[in-house]
Image (cartoon, rainbow, N blue to C red):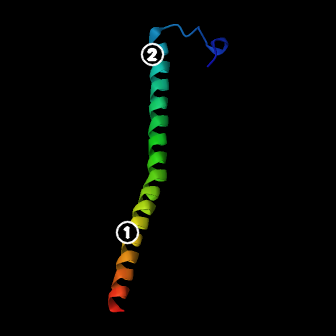
Amino acid sequence: MLNDEVDWSLGSDQEIDKLIQKEKSRSKTTLAMLGCLGLIVLTPLIIIINLKSILMYLFHYLVDFINGLL
């Protein structure tokens, strides 16, 4: 909020403290939402990377098994 938009006629310190607490609460909520969004994005990425390594391991095991049969 710009200084021109600030209503300086609030009067009591209690009302100003309420506004400050409201802004702090809003910033915590935003931070929590960003954290959740990060988890939603990173979890599938980690699963895909691990799945890729597991599939590569199984593929090499399968190739070794087939070579053993030949």
Among the 4 quarters of the image, the one containing residue 9? top right
The crowd level at tag 1 (other Cα within 10 Å; few <14, some 14-19, many 20+) is: few
- Number of marks present in the image shown: 2
Front residue of 32/18: it is 32
- Up-down: is 60 above or below 51? below
Disc 2 from disc 1: Cα separation: 55 Å
Which residue is the extreme one toward the right?
Answer: 4
Front residue of 36/70: it is 70
Tell me the quadrant of the picture where the C terminus can be found.
bottom left
Secondary structure of the residue carrying tag 1 is helix
- Up-down: is 44 above or below 11? below
Q: Residue at x 65, y 15 (%)?
A: 5
Q: Earlier in the sequence, mark 2 or mark 1?
A: 2
The crowd level at tag 2 (other Cα within 10 Å; few <14, some 14-19, many 20+) is: few
Q: Is residue 12 left or right of residue 9?
A: left
Q: Which residue is mark 2?
A: 17
Return the x and y of residue 30 as percentages of the image width and height: 49, 36
Residue 54's disc number: 1
Residue 2's disc number: none
Return the x and y of residue 36 as percentages of the image width and height: 45, 46
Q: Residue at x 47, y 19 (%)?
A: 20
Judge depth for marks 2 and 1 and give the one in front: 1
Among the 4 quarters of the image, the one containing residue 28? top left
Q: Which kind of residue does numbered mark 2 sit on?
A: Asp
- Up-down: is 49 above or below 19? below
Front residue of 25/16: it is 25
Q: Which kind of residue does numbered mark 1 sit on?
A: Ile
Secondary structure of the residue carrying tag 2 is helix
Return the x and y of residue 45 as percentages of the image width and height: 46, 57
Return the x and y of residue 41 as percentages of the image width and height: 49, 52
Q: Residue at x 45, y 62 (%)?
A: 48
